[in-house]
Amino acid sequence: MNILVVYAHHEPKSLVGSLKNLGISKLQEMGHQVVESDLYGIGFHPVANVYDFQTLSGGHFNYMLEQKYATENSWSYSPDVLEQMQRLQAADLVIFYTPIWWSSVPAILKGWFDRVLTMGFAWDSGKIYEDGLLRGKKVLFVGTAASPEEFYQPLGKYRATLRQVLHPILHGTLAFCGMDILDPFFVFSSMNKTPEEYSAILDSHAQAIELAVNNPHYLSKF
Amino acid sequence: MNILVVYAHHEPKSLVGSLKNLGISKLQEMGHQVVESDLYGIGFHPVANVYDFQTLSGGHFNYMLEQKYATENSWSYSPDVLEQMQRLQAADLVIFYTPIWWSSVPAILKGWFDRVLTMGFAWDSGKIYEDGLLRGKKVLFVGTAASPEEFYQPLGKYRATLRQVLHPILHGTLAFCGMDILDPFFVFSSMNKTPEEYSAILDSHAQAIELAVNNPHYLSKF
């Protein structure tokens, strides 16, 4: 399989960093091709703007319609966007490694969604969800949160389950483009782990990676 | 009242831009003090990182704990973060003007949440929701979406209501810091308005602004 890892943490020694390193090693051991987009490492610029396009339609500047125009004009995107689109196009499985900040992904990863999941390429008018242009690709979302699991309950502090908190990302964004969403791998209370717990989390992640790659029924209903 | 407007659109001629201009004029006519943070205009950098702090704790770099450390050390943040924190601190009401992209705010605004709603200032350990450090401030969220309203239904394309889609922002982020969330002003199908509809939307927004400022019971339960 061709696997794209999109990594959104600034600290290599973080739990997210450890999970990502383990995931990549495990996948390579299994003989898969892994490409890593280390968003902090490459200084990915997350702000959608006019400079994302090499040519403009000339009309009123609407970001979505400029995406459509650029896609139809030989993918005339700026090189940094184009590179991510090509990596995504080549991938059978995309794994996101990210902390959860403010019930969502960090801005650097939100900007990857904004700039890379372009109209005409990832989706189009009438080409969403089961007809989305990225159908056939799988997504594994790996996240960590400082908050405890008890916050993520209908009557917990967040007044929402983890599934509901991640819904705008997994359903509203990734499934929108037609991708199949695997069960997320998620760690709560990420700052309070003993060495034994830390090591158990990594073991469990290695198993999740194996399942994600080998078990076609390991699908979630996001 | 002191009102902070946080504006997150790159195109002044957009509907979001028109709503924002109208809102500011209306508030100024009413005699209120308005400060505008035009995130695209000031080139706000949304990526949380080590350069957000003028001094570091020296420990393992954990963004949240560095925020806490900086807050306790004379707010030793980088000048761009500090300026936004001071504007927020001075505000009685914060109005966000933003498009909805991928069921959330653009990266430039997500990064404002990530970098400005800092630990020790906006919230703290045990100081969240009704005890959040920004309690007493109100929030009016003004958003536009290209998608039609029918997508935002439990059985619609998004499999979620608007309230559920905005929950991570309004409840998971802004209410988390103790702010009171007013009923959002929201426009669906934002790209398909006739001149008459456009003008009716602006009129209705002027009324919403008046209510938000004058009616203390105009509170939502986000």
Image: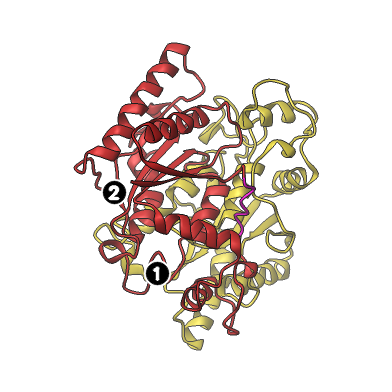
Chain colours: A red, B yellow
Mark 1 surroundings within 10 Å by alpha-carbon count, few (fewer than 14), some (14 through 19), many (20 or more): some
Q: Answer with the quarter of the image where residue B77 lies.
A: top right
Q: Position of residue A57 (x, y in %)?
A: 57, 82
- Residue A155 located left or right of residue B194: left
What is the magenta range?
Answer: A42-47
Residue A191 located within the stretch drawn in magenta? no
As helix, strand or loop, the secondary structure at mark 2 comes to: loop
Q: Position of residue A185 (x, y in %)?
A: 36, 34
Residue B147, which numbered label?
A: 1
- Residue A33 located left or right of residue A60: left
Q: Is residue A139 visible?
A: yes
* Amino acid type assigned to the residue bearing label 1 in the image: Ser
At horizontal 42% and vertical 67% (from top left) the residue drawn is: A121
As helix, strand or loop, the secondary structure at mark 1 comes to: loop
At horizontal 59% and vertical 77% (from top left) the residue drawn is: A61
* Amino acid type assigned to the residue bearing label 2 in the image: Phe
Q: Nearer the viewer, residue B4 or A137?
A: A137
The chain ID associated with circle 1 is: B
Q: Nearer the viewer, residue B207 or A70?
A: A70
The chain ID associated with circle 2 is: A
Q: Is residue B163 visible?
A: no
Quadrant assignment for the N terminus of chain B: bottom right
